[in-house]
Image (cartoon, rainbow, N blue to C red):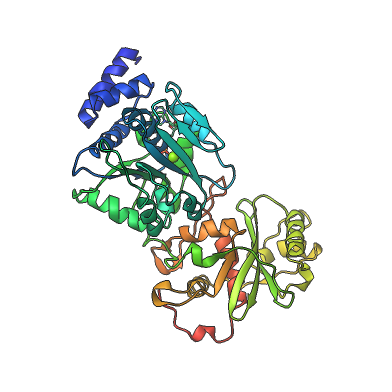
Amino acid sequence: MTTTPTAELDRLLVAAKTAGVQREQIARFVRAGYVAQPKQLEFHAACRLADWPGGPVLIGYGGARGPGKSHASIVQAAVDDCQRVPGLKVLFLRKVGKAARESFNDLRQRTLRYLLHAYNAGSGALSFPNGSLIVIGNFYTEKDIDKYLGIEYDLIIIEEATQLSEEKFKMLRGSLRTSKTNWRPRMYLTTNPGGIGHQWFKRMFVLPWRSGRQTQTRFIQGTYRDNRFLNQEYREYLEGLTGVLGRMWRDGDWDIGAGTFFVNWDYDRHVTAPFRVPDHWPVWASLDYGFGHPTAVYLHTRNDGTIWTIAEHVQARWLAPQHAAAIHEMARRCDRRVEDFESFVAGHDVFAERGNSDGMTIAEQYAVEGIKLTPANIGRITGAAEMLRRMGDPAAGIAPTWRIFDTCVQLIECLPNLQTDPNRPEDVLKTDANEEGIGGDDPYDSARYGLMEARPPFAGMFVVRR
Ligand SMILES: Nc1ncnc2c1ncn2[C@@H]1O[C@H](COP(=O)(O)OP(=O)(O)O)[C@@H](O)[C@H]1O
Ligand SMILES: [Mg+2]
């Protein structure tokens, strides 16, 4: 069946009307060449409800990957809000991946082609002839957001909102204020399930939506099935996802697991700037082996009952000699030699798996490179409990006895995302990395081996509570 542009436009107008999108709002979209899809129309209608006294001020758009959340939220801000209210000041916070800080330019070119604007990639400022301004802020960890706090915005958009703690979200909300009489300050939040913010987001947006009792909030649930513009490869990628990642990213399932495992994780308390490790402090290492999945290596040190994880190497598809070179280099950066390490523990597969044509085990291949691996304590539940214990408990005034240098970026990204295994509530749910290497638990496994290695005698006598 072929459709004419007029038929397409007719359909759009009917759908827009049904969704409650304002006439003049849809006219702006049409002029900007944007054909909103049904869920996007619902989102746009909800955003305009915020204009009315008593209307919602927090609009959540979520569920899963790919419904067109980013596309719709930038269009709502740039094409609609910024055009109808001169001098509007908007903060658009984007979560960027660790690999490439993917540019805002791609999104801008897809969405704002027919809208007059100026973009300064250096400062991240997107400005319009009527004085409206969108500040594009990137965050990698939630700490990056601090630089945007304390400045006032009329509208704040947070992408991947469940990557933020409730505390950070509240701080951002504190930056929401207006001096305009023709504008009610508001937030648009887009996200998938999972992450440290999963619980508060679910409580604040998803539960009221489910029970039909939304007051301050509106929530629009969408998945990739609601987006006909999604490319085939991405569709297939999502359809092929298994386990918890599939439930989060493909299905938009808000009921995964019993939630976050490390409920006591706190970036500000657990992550520290690197310092030079004194010569008399012991250093040891841990390794979790993978080839398709990354191999993850950490160096640790301890003093006076506290452990610091001080260096990280995470890499997929490398062979033992390449990893070994990287490990020797890590040791050098800490003014140590691998031979001086107190120990170098690894998951048991390295002693079993024969990885090269000579029939050598992985451990034997590392031995050739001057790295002697010994079996780690791999008990999952005891290891998870030990990590929980070492993270401390701020509510009970118990300080952490484990800290991580901020250079260990993959570990820092991994820990707050780990979920509880619904079938074994004492354990962390196993997750595999996707092909971009995101979402896996390999850094966690390796760090866990490292912590277990430093476990003081009799530590097992303490009762660990969550
Ligand atoms: N209404 C639309 N018109 C054209 N392309 C769209 C539309 N909505 C989404 N897309 C495209 O679909 C893809 C996924 O959308 P995106 O906003 O990145 O999804 P999400 O942020 O929900 O993961 C992008 O390439 C985006 O440009
Ligand atoms: Mg997006």
- State whether residue 340 is above or below residue 34: below
- Nearest the viewer among 80 and 335 is 80
Side of 346 relative to 219 (left or right)? right
Q: Is residue 60 visible?
A: no
Query: Quadrant location of residue 328?
Result: bottom right
- Total count of labels: 0
Which image quarter is the C terminus in?
A: bottom left
- Nearest the viewer among 238 and 49 is 49
- State whether residue 68 is above or below residue 304: above
> Where's residue 437, x and y in %?
57, 49
> Where's residue 199, x and y in %?
35, 58
Q: Quadrant of ligand 2?
A: top left
Query: Quadrant location of residue 42?
Result: top left
Q: Is residue 115 visible?
A: yes
Which residue occupies 43% across, 72% down?
394
> Where's residue 17, x and y in %?
21, 26
- Nearest the viewer among 133 and 341 is 133
- State whether residue 194 is above or below residue 22: below
Which residue occupies 59% across, 45% down?
99
Which residue occupies 38% across, 61% down?
259
Which image quarter is the N terminus in?
A: top left
Residue lying furthest front in this view?
Answer: 179
Which residue occupies 54% across, 75% down?
401
> Where's residue 37, x and y in %?
33, 29
Side of 147 relative to 216 (left or right)? right
Side of 362 relative to 309 (left or right)? right
Query: Quadrant location of residue 20?
Result: top left
